Amino acid sequence: MTIAFRDLFGSGINASVQVLFLPGTILILASLFTFVLHGMSGRDYGRALKASGTTMIAAAPALLLAVPMVQVFLNSASDSYASMPIVLAQGVSSVVGDAWPMFAPLIGAMGAFVAGSNTVSNMMFSLFQFSTAEQIGLGAAGAGTVVALQAIGGAAGNMICVHNVVAASATVGLTDREGAIIRQTLIPMAYYVVQGGLIGFALLTGNPMWWVAAAIWAGAVLFFMSRNRGPRPDTVAN
């Protein structure tokens, strides 16, 4: 069952929702099966619904504001100008030049941070990544490696995506601690992105010094983690 929205506000943008494929639909069906199979009383099921509703209401404002703004950001292209994510990526590529492979994962991470999806990040930036790689003389094979770095960055960016963090925080009872969670996950995301760029550069250039740099970076991060274990999760303050 698909609910479709055509030409939203005259913008030419279409959207659709497949209700039976939504994660929420599956969870609701699972709760109903649980109610029947375990012979729960109506009072117990009502308490469960109340607890779930309280959690959902706490997370809803951030999600209701963040998700539409993401769509505005992604669909900001016009007849004269590219969309905002593409303009940002083009700005970075014009500055870094031949060092682009080091920054390709960062662009992927930015796309996933904004869109909340590695898939959407790849849809936005893969062609741009491929074209930029060819422009700096990497050829088709090298451009394929750069697109792979884009996907690596997209996976890293999911760690700090706002609406992913909000939803996850509400699920585990850490509502209002999203800022602290994002600050802490920035560290592994930064390691992930930089390490991907170093390994990608090593593969593209064949220079063993880049492998050495990747090993040094990994060692430095492991040393930092061993020296800074951080507070227990239940003591994190926003």
Image: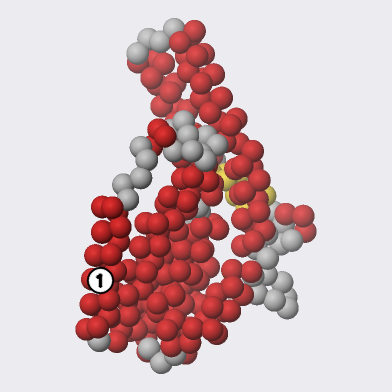
Residue 121 percent coordinates (x, y) = 49, 63
Residue 201 picture quarter: bottom left
Q: Nearer the viewer, residue 118 or 62?
A: 62
Residue 78 picture quarter: bottom right
Q: What's the residue at 27%, 80% (across, down)?
A: 210
Q: Residues within 10 Å of mark 1 (few under 14, many from 20)?
A: few
Residue ranking furthest to the bottom: 137
Q: Nearer the viewer, residue 178 or 86?
A: 178
Q: What's the residue at 45%, 59% (across, down)?
A: 157
Residue 169 percent coordinates (x, y) = 48, 38
Q: What's the residue at 57%, 79% (across, down)?
A: 90
Relative to 94, say whether 73 is above or below.
Answer: above
Residue 56 percent coordinates (x, y) = 55, 31
Query: Seen in the image, is 6 located left or right of residue 147?
Result: right
Q: Nearer the viewer, residue 162 or 40?
A: 162
Relative to 176, say whether 135 is above or below.
Answer: below
Task: Specify how the rendered protein is coloured.
Answer: secondary structure
Q: Nearer the viewer, residue 17 or 1?
A: 17
Residue 118 percent coordinates (x, y) = 44, 59
Q: What's the residue at 77%, 55% (across, down)?
A: 9
Residue 53 picture quarter: top right
Q: Residue beneath label 1, please?
A: 216
The N terminus lies in which quarter of the figure? top right
Residue type at mark 1: give it.
Answer: Ile
